[in-house]
Amino acid sequence: PWETTGAKDKSGNSVALNDASVAGYVGYSYFKANGTFKIFGLNDALRSQGTWSISPDGKKRTLVGLDNNGNVTFTRVVDILLLNETT
């Protein structure tokens, strides 16, 4: 599991996790070894679900959001800053 512990605005200033401007981006994420994930908001409501993968070179993480019928709702590719056995 991964818990959001902080948020920043575009200027790098800290924003409270319950602030409406970040509410859609914070919560609890669960990444399973089978390549699936679920993300819940701070109110424990399911926000998104789908599949995840890491590029062969370990530099990118891809999330593919799926609706309840298995249709793709979004794809996000993000840089991995640090990846090892404990982080």
Image: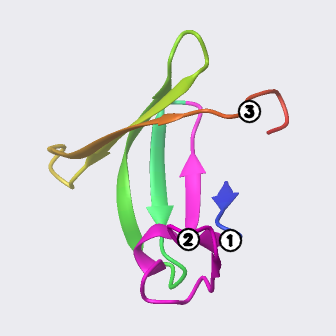
Q: Position of residue 54 (x, y in %)?
A: 53, 24
Question: What residue sits 66% from the left and 56% below the top?
Answer: 2
Q: Of the residues tagged 1 and 2, which is closer to the observer?
A: 1
CA gap, disc 1 and disc 2 = 10 Å
Q: Which residue is mark 1?
A: 6
Residue 72 picture quarter = top left
SS for tag 1?
loop
Question: What residue sits 57% from the left and 44% below the top?
Answer: 31
Instruction: In this rendered view, identify the residue nearer to me: 8 or 52.
Output: 8
Crowding near the residue tagged with mark 3, few <14, some 14–19, many ≥20 C-alpha atoms within 10 Å:
few
Q: Read off the magenta span.
A: 7-33
Q: Where the N terminus falls, by quadrant?
A: bottom right
Q: Position of residue 24 (x, y in %)?
A: 40, 74
Q: Where the C terminus falls, by quadrant?
A: top right
Image check: 69 left or right of 83?
left
Image check: 69 left or right of 12?
left
Q: Position of residue 46 (x, y in %)?
A: 40, 69
Q: Amino acid at mark 3?
A: Leu
Q: Which residue is mark 3?
A: 82
Instruction: Give the mark nearer the N terminus: 3 vs 2.
Output: 2
Image check: 77 left or right of 14?
left
Q: Which residue is mark 2?
A: 27
CA gap, disc 3 and disc 1 = 18 Å
Q: Amino acid at mark 2?
A: Gly
In the image, is residue 78 above or below residue 2? above
Instruction: In this rendered view, identify the residue nearer to me: 11 or 71.
Output: 11
Instruction: Give the mark nearer the N terminus: 1 vs 2.
Output: 1
Instruction: Give the mark nearer the N terminus: 3 vs 1.
Output: 1
Crowding near the residue tagged with mark 1, few <14, some 14–19, many ≥20 C-alpha atoms within 10 Å:
few
Question: What residue sits 47% from the left and 27% below the top?
Answer: 53
